[in-house]
Image (spheres, helix red, strand yellow):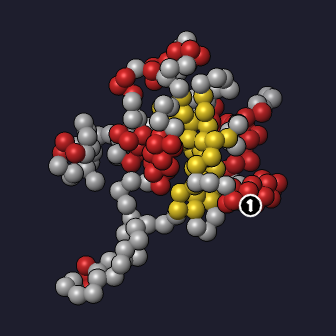
Amino acid sequence: MARSFYSHIAEAWQTPKEGKLAELQWQRQQEWRKQGAIERVDRPTRLDRARSLGYKAKQGVVVARVAVRKGGARKQRFKAGRRSKRQGVNKITRRKSIQRIAEERASRKFRNLRTLNSYWVGEDGSQKWFEVILLDPNHGAIQNDDDLNWICDDSHRGRAFRGKTSAGQQGRGLSTRGTGTEHTRPSIRSNDGRGK
C-alpha cells in the first residue's frame, strides 16, 4: 500500500537528531537563535503535526515560532532557617510546562488571535522552540469553516491561559480518567489544589 507524504515527514521527525533532518535542524537553529523570541512563520516546520492539530493553509490561520528557556525553576540557595531536606535548589520544576508558557506568550503577542494548539520543533542546550497555531475568530474564512468555526464562540477566549489546549489539558491532569484522578475534575482549583 502506498504511503502518504505526511507519513514520511512523521517518520523523519521520530528521530530528528539522525539523517538529513539532523543537518537541516542544525542549520535552522543557527537562524532561529538570531531571531526574536516570537516570530511569525509562513508555513509550519512540521506539516504533518500541524495538520493533525488542526492547521489549514488558509487565511485567518497564523503560525508563530516561540523560543522558551529550558530547565526547571531558578532558585537561590537559602542562607539560613532551613534544614537540609528543605533546601532544594536544583531539581525544582514548575507546575506549568514550557510548552504552555510558549502558548501563553504567543497569545499575548497576537492579542486578536486565539490559540488552537502547539507542537515542539527543536531545542538546543539553553532553549526550546515550539510552533503555535493561532486562529483569527473575526476572519470570514474561519467563521465559514465547519472544522474551525467553533473557536469563534466567546467561550474560547483566552484558551491558552485557562489550560484548554492539548498541552494545557495534559498539564491539568485530564489525560487520565478513573481511580486516582478524583481531584482533577472539574478543576484542580475546585479541589483545593489536591489534584497536583
10 Å neighbourhood of mark 1: few (<14), some, or many (≥20)? few
Any part of residue 179 in sight: no
Horizontal side of 185 relative to 147 (left or right) equals left
Disc 1 element:
helix
Please identify the quadrant where the C terminus is shown: bottom left
Please identify the quadrant where the N terminus is shown: top right
At horizontal 46% and vertical 42% (from top left) the residue drawn is 108
**Quarter where residue 49 is shown:** top right
Any part of residue 9 in sight: yes
Residue 185 image point, x, y percent? 25, 38
**Quarter where residue 35 is shown:** bottom right
Horizontal side of 184 relative to 169 (left or right) equals left
Residue 15 image point, x, y percent? 70, 54
- Kind of residue at disc 1: Gln
Between residue 57 and residue 34, name the one nearer to us. Answer: 34
At horizontal 67% and vertical 60% (from top left) the residue drawn is 33
At horizontal 62% and vertical 59% (from top left) the residue drawn is 123
Residue 14 image point, x, y percent? 67, 50
- For the image, the number of numbered tags is 1
Q: Is residue 81 above or below residue 128?
A: below
At horizontal 35% and vertical 56% (from top left) the residue drawn is 95
**Quarter where residue 42 is shown:** top right
Residue 114 image point, x, y percent? 48, 32
Between residue 173 and residue 118, name the one nearer to us. Answer: 118
Q: Is residue 42 above or below residue 61?
A: below
Q: Dot 1 corresponds to which residue?
A: 30
